[in-house]
Image (spheres, helix red, strand yellow):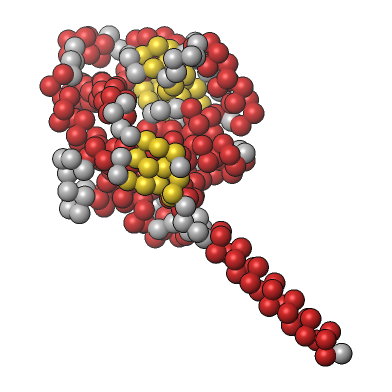
Amino acid sequence: MKNKKLNKILAIIILFFLLTNYVQTENKIIIKYQIENEILTNIDLLNEEKYLLALNNSLQNIPKNQLREISEDSLIREKIKKIELSKYYDFSRESKYADQLLKDFYKRLNFNNEKDFNLYLMKFNLNLSIIKEKLKIETLWNEMVFNKYNNQIKIDEEKIKLKIKTQKKILKEYNLSEILFQLNSDEKTLDKYNLILKNIENSGFKNSANLYSISDSAKFGGEIGWINQNQLNDNLLKEIENLNVNQLTKPIQVSSGYLIIKLNKQKEKEKELNFEKTFKQMVAKEKNRQLNQFSLIYFNKIKQNIYISEK
């Protein structure tokens, strides 16, 4: 009887140590990547997965290895940007635009206030400090790109003015999503396009944007939102005008890669023309388009000179 009792106690002790060891293994910090003198751990990747899932819930439907791949790419891009930014900016300095940036961010995700957004983040074991840090990196990156390339932006103001003057009375608006992809040295455009189409068919457009798109919109599933026809350049407008709702364009070559556009919705409204306001909006849109191209070109340039090692 004593032996049975002793064996039972020993079994409980062994089970306890096995469970403790398992939990410790699960929580063990493992270095996954070294980027210059910075490291990315399994915990960093797990937090990135939770962040991307919070932005795009449908990612929970894709295979875990695919989600991990998306998270790795996203976090490596962010780390490269931060390394470059640290040469020019003091990250300990608080941004005076932090509150407004956060507000714009959660409004884009359809939250009315910071409290509701914070409660939502808690479901993913995330907090606002993580979001604020990511927003700071993106904001400083955009500021740096603007300072570097603003004098290289070329705007044909006369062409924009002529476009406004020749507007039709009825203005079309398009709700769009995008996938901006680049080719590796061994890839062909049609093969990559078909690969993306297959993934869209299996996993949906949003998840495919997370996986393949190099645009900043990727983390939002490629969503651009509503754009009126005057804010689109002539080549894009020509492609989009031929689409039905939920259809995709063929790959459109742009300076930073190849663009696939999805038409989510469209509507028409009677034009209420304010010439100055419309002109400023169109100029700003064209500036942003060119700056986004410069941003990708600059990122690819610095990435080539960054030491990245997978552990």
- Residue reaching furthest to the left: 151
Please provide percent x and percent y for residue 232.
34, 17
Most foreground residue, 58 or 5: 5
Q: Is residue 145 visible?
A: yes
Left or right of 108 in this view: 282: left
Identified at 37% across, 47% down, the residue is: 39
Identified at 50% across, 22% down, the residue is: 262
Please provide percent x and percent y for residue 15.
70, 72
- Residue reaching furthest to the right: 1
Left or right of 154 in this view: 22: right
Most foreground residue, 21 or 251: 21
Which quadrant would residue 293 be assigned to in this image?
top left
Which quadrant does the N terminus fall into?
bottom right
Please provide percent x and percent y for residue 65.
58, 39
Most foreground residue, 43 or 200: 43
- Residue reaching furthest to the bottom: 2
Which quadrant would residue 175 be assigned to in this image?
top left
Please provide percent x and percent y for residue 48.
45, 47
Q: Is residue 103 visible?
A: no
Q: How many numbered marks does the figure carry?
A: 0
Identified at 77% across, 85% down, the residue is: 6
Which quadrant would residue 276 be assigned to in this image?
top left
Most foreground residue, 280 or 249: 249
* 103, above or below 17, in the image: above
Identified at 61% across, 32% down, the residue is: 203
- Residue reaching furthest to the front: 3
